[in-house]
């Protein structure tokens, strides 16, 4: 059972390892630099703030823009939002993959006066001069380059399967463990299974996803050990608790087909205080006390 997690490729962006933690360059994907993010947000009263989402899959796909929404809400509360130029630069083609939730998030973007830029890859950080170089990655902007100055930039590092997976026979052409997306069994090596962020599954890489993958793979491994065909299918369920401001959260839950798979009997595409409290108060306890102990699966 292969589940080594995901690799943060800081070196994939030229200048990022040297720049991060100073000159307005930060990332919540590092425990070391997350406090610097808050320091920058608190200290910035006027100027340009860039929030970056890479062209690769990442763990917790909502994280790159959750911090942007929180920052915008902080600046609104401080009365300086009108003086801020907030920009989102993303390697994706849209804000969110599920239309039902994206509709709400676009309203949050409008509320924050955020400028959206899609299908751009962050190539370089010039820390001393506080500027970032983006390169277009689709036909309409292919190889076009833009240097963008900033007062702060929150970078989400490109991510991949660990190197020892990418260079192994287990990997697909994209570098992830090459498994059937329903049974979680390797497509070539039938005694190999994979779950979690390193698995080549076309769904968001989240803790909620692995909570559903675990009972699936257990049942199917037991089937294989008994000489039977795996009978349990994973439908791609994943969840992104999208914090959209202080006391506001959209709880996105969906499957491989980007069809909502909601838990609660209300419209989860709406910003709700109750869902914010679920994220703040309940989910940490659920994770540490139950999920990690195998007592909250399925």
Image (cartoon, rainbow, N blue to C red):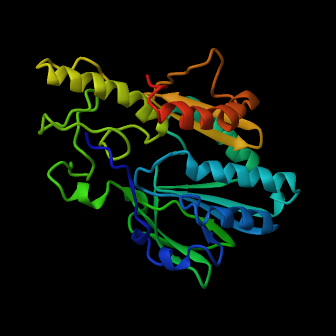
Can see residue 235? no
Tell me what residue is drawn at x 51 percent, y 80 percent. 18
> Position of 100 compared to 235: left or right?
right
Tell me what residue is drawn at x 77 percent, y 43 percent. 246
Residue that extends furthest to the top in the rendered view of this protein: 265
Tell me what residue is drawn at x 48 percent, y 75 percent. 17
Residue 218 falls in image quadrant: top left
Percent across and percent down for residue 247 are: 77, 38
> Position of 197 compared to 183: left or right?
right
The C terminus, quarter of image: top left
The N terminus, quarter of image: top left
Q: Vertical placement of 198 versus 276: above or below?
A: below
Residue 104 falls in image quadrant: top right
Residue that extends furthest to the bottom in the rendered view of this protein: 128
Q: Vertical placement of 198 versus 24: above or below?
A: above
Q: Vertical placement of 222 versus 106: above or below?
A: above
Q: Vertical placement of 251 versus 142: above or below?
A: above
Percent across and percent down for residue 283 are: 61, 34
> Position of 49 compared to 219: left or right?
right
Can see residue 55? yes
Tell me what residue is drawn at x 79 percent, y 53 percent. 74
């Amino acid at each position: 059972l292969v589940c080594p997690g995901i690799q943060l490729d800081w070196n994939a962006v030229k200048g990022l390892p040297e720049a991060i933690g100073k000159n307005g360059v930060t990332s919540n994907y590092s425990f070391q630099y997350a406090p610097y993010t808050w320091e920058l947000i608190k200290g910035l009263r006027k100027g340009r703030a860039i929030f970056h989402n890479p062209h690769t899959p990442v763990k917790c796909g909502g994280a790159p823009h959750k911090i942007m929404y929180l920052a915008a809400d902080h600046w609104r509360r401080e009365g300086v939002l009108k003086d801020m130029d907030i920009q989102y630069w993303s390697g994706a083609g849209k804000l969110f993959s599920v239309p039902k939730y994206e509709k709400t998030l676009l309203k949050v973007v409008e509320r924050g006066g955020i400028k959206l830029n899609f299908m751009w890859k962050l190539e370089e950080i010039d820390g001393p001069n506080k500027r970032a170089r983006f390169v277009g990655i689709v036909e309409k902007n292919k190889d076009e380059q833009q240097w963008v100055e900033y007062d702060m930039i929150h970078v989400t590092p490109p991510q991949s399967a660990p190197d020892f997976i990418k260079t192994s026979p287990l990997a697909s052409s994209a570098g992830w463990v090459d498994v059937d997306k329903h049974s979680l069994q390797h497509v070539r090596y039938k005694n190999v299974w994979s779950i979690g962020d390193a698995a080549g599954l076309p769904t968001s890489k989240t803790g909620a996803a692995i909570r559903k993958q675990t009972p699936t793979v257990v049942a199917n491994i037991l089937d294989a050990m008994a000489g039977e065909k795996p009978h349990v299918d994973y439908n791609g369920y994943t969840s992104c608790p999208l914090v959209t401001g202080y006391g506001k959260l959209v709880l996105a839950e969906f499957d491989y087909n980007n069809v909502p798979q909601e838990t609660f009997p209300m419209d989860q595409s709406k910003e709700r205080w109750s869902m914010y409290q679920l994220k703040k108060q309940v989910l940490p306890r659920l994770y540490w006390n139950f999920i990690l102990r195998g007592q909250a699966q399925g």
